[in-house]
Each structure stands twice: as C-alpha cells, then as structure tokens.
Amino acid sequence: MDKNRILIAETIENQISPSYKELLGFGASFHPDRESRILLIIPGQNVKELAEQIAMENNIHTLAIEHEDLRYPNPCFLEKILPEVIRENMPSYICLMHNVRTCQLAASLSIQIGTPCITGIESYEIQQEKTVFTRMMFNGKLIGRTACKTGPVILTVIPGSFSGSFTTDHSIQNGKTMIMKVHETVFGYKPVRIIETISKDNKLEEADVIVSAGMGIEKEERMELIRKIASIFSNAAIGGSRIVCDHGWLPYSCQIGETGKQVSPKLYIACGISGTMQHTAGMKKSGCIVAINKDPNAPIFSIADYGVVEYLQSFLPILAARYDDRKKNP
Ligand SMILES: Cc1cc2nc3c(=O)[nH]c(=O)nc-3n(C[C@H](O)[C@H](O)[C@H](O)COP(=O)(O)OP(=O)(O)OC[C@H]3O[C@@H](n4cnc5c(N)ncnc54)[C@H](O)[C@@H]3O)c2cc1C
C-alpha cells in the first residue's frame, strides 16, 4: 500500500473549498504511478452527494465524514476521528492545504499517530529517490529543506504553490465514495457561525489592481497615501497585511494572505510589506507585483516584478503628483 495519499479537504456549509483542486494536483504530482491511490476526505454536515460527484469526476476514492458539528471547519472534532481513518488506510502522505485550522489539525494528528509533520510546503524535489520538501523559515529569510526517513508524513501546502491541474491519469478507474457517520459521543468544540465583515465597496477578489499596505506605512494617517494611489486606477481595491489589520488601520476583510483573502489581480502594489510567506501565500499569483520598501533585502523583492527601494513617505507622494500632472497635461 506504499505511496497512497490521503488528502483532507475543507467545507463550509457543505460547499467544498476551491483549494481542493490544488490539493488534488499536489497529491498526484509526486510519486505518481498506477499503483498509488488517492483518498480525498470530505468532512461536512451533509456532503455525501458532493463526495460522490468529486469521486466520479476525478476517478478517485472519496470519504464523506458527516456530522452536524462539521457544518464549519472543525479541527478539534476531526482530530478525534481521523487517526483511526489514517491507520486503516496506511497512507505514505497525508496532505492538507495550509491555514491556521489545518496546522492545528496536522500537529495534533502528528502527535497522535507518532509521525513526522512538515508545515508550509512551497515546493519539493526528488533527490536520490527521496522527496525533499521546501518551506520558508524565519519570515522568508531562510529556506528549509526537509526529507523524512519514516512515514506516513503529514504535509500542509501553502495555497498557490502548486497548480491545480489534476489529471485522471494518476487515479484509478471507478472511484467510489464511502460514508462515515460519526458516533454521537464524539465531540469537539462546535463552531456556530462565521463572522464576515465584508466591505461592499472594496471587492478585493474582483479588483484589477490592489494597493496593499504593510507596517511600512508606520502610522494610520499614511493610509491616506494608499487611498490616493488606489484612486488612480479605475478598478482598484485596498488590501493589507495582517499586522495592519491587527492595528485596526484596515478591517480584517482587507487582510491578504494565508489567513486572509487569496487574490490574483493584474497589478499588486505592495507598500511597506516585508513579504513573509503568510502574506505572499495570498498574493503571489498576481499578474504583476510591484514592491516599495526601504529595505533592499526585504523578502518581498524576491517575488516582485518591479522593486522600488525607497521610503513610502518619499515615493508615494511623488508618484501621486506625477499622475496629477499627467492628468492635467496629458
Ligand atoms: C499563523 C499565522 C498566520 C498569518 N497570516 C497572515 C496573513 O494572512 N496575512 C499577513 O499579511 N500576515 C499573516 N501573518 C503575519 C505574518 O507572519 C507577518 O507578521 C506579516 O505579514 C508582516 O506584515 P508586514 O509585512 O506589514 O510587517 P513587517 O514584517 O513588520 O514589515 C514591514 C516592512 O516595511 C518596511 N518599511 C518600514 N518602514 C518603511 C517605510 N517608511 N517605507 C518603506 N518601507 C518601510 C520594512 O523594511 C519591512 O520590510 C500570519 C502569521 C501567523 C503566525
């Protein structure tokens, strides 16, 4: 049964997170051969039909785990039932998309099963028949490469790192769906609702241009500069790093990154953002990335198409003034 993979998807109100396609693409991409099997676990309140449809479309096995407390992602609940499923299926790899919830689940499974766990994977390579996984460390300043001698290995994958192209070449024919009704005595915490703070006039996912503020703005008053730059473009929105949202300078609905929004505008202007993997996980698929930062060694420059090494308070007013001049004298 070597090389089998268990993939664990997330659902919210019985809708599967679109990132499951990337998870499938990742799961099928390493050690693909006709002998290996993929089992996609879909936890949710009422997900049998969804699991059947995905099994049929992709020719993979799916396991629907149903319980009313799985209406929303619930790692505390899953950590009680998944160890048994994993032991029964004996996979080589257990893969999840990386976020705060799956990190909690991965860590708990790792301890319970007594198996290695590598979080935040961005790429991998095969070296002398060993799979070596790469992850960023210390806010992107170091790159760590890890291979495991024993398995199964639990992996969390940074969103946007792998293409979602899954082909049925790597799967079995006639994928089937299994249903697991969870025993009533299993309990975890029970999420009751998701709090959404969506600003209607700042549609990050639909914007062609996102001007994004990081801690380099240094004080809230400088958000005005960010707004001014955004107003230059016809379909622009304002985003920010998590710390800027933590300071209350932007609402959390504007947070971009691993625990915020995943965006891919035509143009992303990162203003005073260092470029940690938690932030870049949410924007690195953007068409063109422009970074403005006073530190020439800021990690954001490693993924930027254009880099400006300058203080925001010096550069942004000049940029805005040049635009105003052009408008007056086209
Ligand atoms: C589990 C977890 C999940 C997370 N999820 C997210 C997430 O979804 N999104 C997210 O963004 N973060 C997330 N984070 C936080 C993340 O690790 C970083 O702390 C955060 O992204 C850093 O934000 P920043 O780049 O604005 O600030 P900093 O890292 O402080 O960087 C500020 C940058 O501004 C530059 N700068 C300073 N002053 C100026 C100036 N005057 N002009 C120009 N440049 C200047 C500095 O050189 C520096 O590079 C998460 C962290 C954890 C642990």
Image (cartoon, grey):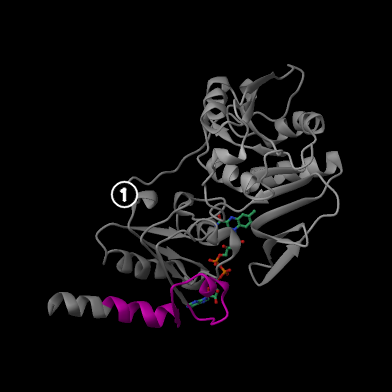
Quadrant hosting ligand 1: bottom right
Residue at left offset 74%, top offset 17%: 183
Instruction: Specify the quadrant of the image occupied by residue 147.
Output: bottom right
Determine whether 13 is above or below 330 in the image.
above
Which amino acid, by three-letter code, is at mark 1? Asp
Disc 1 secondary structure class: loop
Residue underneath mark 1? 201
Residue furthest to the left: 329
Label 1 crowd (10 A; few <14 / some 14-19 / many >=20)? few
- Give how far across and how far down residue 189 sits, in percent: 69, 30
Find the magenta span and give its range.
293-320
Q: Number of marks in the image? A: 1
Instruction: Specify the quadrant of the image occupied by residue 329.
Output: bottom left
Residue at left offset 51%, top offset 46%: 165
Comparing 173 with 290, the one in front is 173
Quadrant assignment for the C terminus: bottom left
- Give how far across and how far down residue 92 sits, in percent: 77, 43
The reply to whether residue 13 is visible in this rendering is no
Comparing 171 with 187, the one in front is 171
Q: Is residue 2 magenta?
A: no
